[in-house]
Amino acid sequence: MTYDNFLNLLKPFGQHANPSVQRPVLMVLDNHASHCSKSSIIFCRENQITLLSFLPLCSHEMQPLDNSMYGPFQSCFGDVVQGFC
């Protein structure tokens, strides 16, 4: 993702979400550098979109099932698929 790609994603998101002063929108993001461009921040500020970026390496806190259930399942499933092929 690049700065321009993220801004191009924000524009239709803003149209779909239709934020306003009475109904602001919160967009939750990972900590990717492309989310921090000046143009994206200005666009969000002008369109009542609040960006919330989580710290890197906190997925174990934010997505506990990913580590305890889905991650091991994905690993086992990959092994089964490899054994089948």
Image: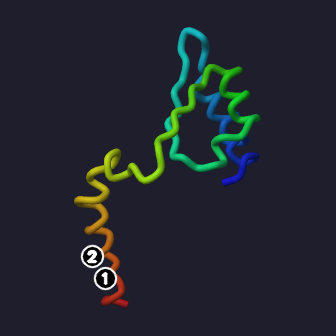
Residue 37: x and y in percent read 71, 40
- The quarter of the rendered structure image containing the C terminus is bottom left
> Residue 12 falls in which quadrant of the image?
top right
The residue located at (47%, 50%) in the rendering is: 56
Q: Is residue 76 above or below residue 24?
A: below
Q: Is residue 2 above or below residue 38?
A: below
Residue 82: x and y in percent read 36, 86
**Label 2's element?**
helix
What amino acid type is highlighted by mark number 2? Answer: Cys
How are the residues colored?
rainbow
Residue located beneath label 2 in the image: 76
Residue located beneath label 1 in the image: 79
Q: Are the two marked residues, 1 and 2, in contact with CB atoms closer than 8 angstroms?
A: yes
Q: Nearer the viewer, residue 11 or 71?
A: 71
**How many numbered callouts?**
2
Q: Is residue 13 above or below residue 20?
A: below
Q: Within 10 angstroms of label 1, few (less than 14), some, or many (20 or more) residues?
A: few
What amino acid type is highlighted by mark number 1? Answer: Asp
Residue 19: x and y in percent read 59, 20
Q: Within 10 angstroms of label 2, few (less than 14), some, or many (20 or more) residues?
A: few
Q: Is residue 42 above or below residue 10?
A: above
